[in-house]
Image (cartoon, rainbow, N blue to C red):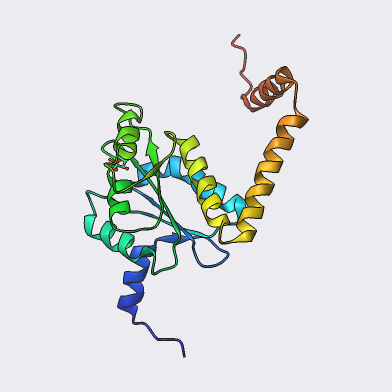
Amino acid sequence: MAKKISRGQKRAKKAVLGGTSSGGRPLVGIIMGSSSDWETMEHAVSTLDELGVPYEKRVVSAHRTPDLLFEYAASAEKRGIEVIIAGAGGAAHLPGMTASKTVLPVLGVPVESKALKGLDSLLSIAQMPGGIPVGTLAIGKTGAINAALLAAAILGGKHPHIREALRNFRGAQTQRVLANPDPSASVLSRKKIRKKRLPKTRKLA
Ligand code: RP5
C-alpha cells in the first residue's frame, strides 16, 4: 500500500525538487545558483527535452541556501537521480560543493559573469582539487547544451532508449550539415529572415 505523506512532508519534498519534466521519474537533476542563470541553463533543459530525458530543475544557491544544497546533493541518489548538472557564475562553488556531497557524476556549467565574462566561473568549476571531480563544460549556452548531451551519454550506458535518442540527435545534426554544404546560402537565408523581422520604417516628409 502507498505510504500517505502529510502536507508538511509534501511541501518539504516540493522545496527540494522544484520543477520536473513530464515523462517519468527524473534521472537528471539540474540546479543553478540563481534564477539569473536560467537564460543559460534553459538550454540544458531544452536539450534534455529534445532527447526525452526526464529531469528536475531548481535554484539551489551554495552561499544563499547552503543547507538546501547539502540536502539536495545528499538525497539526490536516493531519489533516483543519476547525473547532476550544476550551473553557476562568478565564484562558482555550487558544482564543487554538490560533488562533495554525492558520488553521482556532477557536470558543471560556467555561467558567463558580467565582470570577467565567465572566466572566473570556468576556473572556479574546473580547478577542483584532486579527489572531488566536476566534469566542466564550456562557458554559457554551449556548455549548457553539452552538459545535457554528456548527461545523456552517461545515462545511455544503463538506459538503451536514451543512447538511441542521442544517436538520432547526432545523426540529424550530421544530416543538417551535409544537406547545407553551401555556406553563403545559409548566410543569405539568415539575412532574409532578419530582414523579414525588421519593422517597416516610415519616411519623414
Ligand atoms: C552565482 O552568482 C549564481 O550562479 C549567479 O551566476 C551569480 C549571480 O547571482 P545573482 O546575483 O544574479 O542572483 O551564485
Residue nearest the observer in this picture, 205 or 80? 80
Is residue 22 visible in the rendered image? The answer is yes
Residue most extreme to the front: 130
Residue 24 position by quadrant: bottom right
State the image coordinates of residue 176 (x, y, percent, origin top left). 72, 34
In this view, the residue farthest toward the right is 179
Q: Tell me what residue is drawn at x 56 percent, y 61 percent.
A: 158
Q: In the image, what residue occupies the spot 29% across and 35% down?
A: 90
Residue 115's image quarter?
Answer: top left
Specify the quarter for ligand 1.
Answer: top left
Q: x and y percent of residue 62 in the render?
A: 26, 50
Q: Residue at x 33, y 71 (%)?
A: 11
**126, above or below 131, in the image:** above
Q: Can the viewer see residue 33 in this picture?
A: no
Outermost residue to the bottom: 1
Quarter holding residue 69: bottom left
Q: Position of residue 101 (x, y in %)?
A: 29, 58
Foreground of the two, 194 or 30: 30
Work out which quarter of the rendered image holds the C terminus and state it: top right
Q: Is residue 133 above or below residue 58?
A: above
Q: Answer with left or right where residue 132 lies relative to residue 63.
A: right
Q: How many marks?
A: 0
Please state the horizontal and vertical placement of residue 118, each as a whole percent of the image: 35, 31
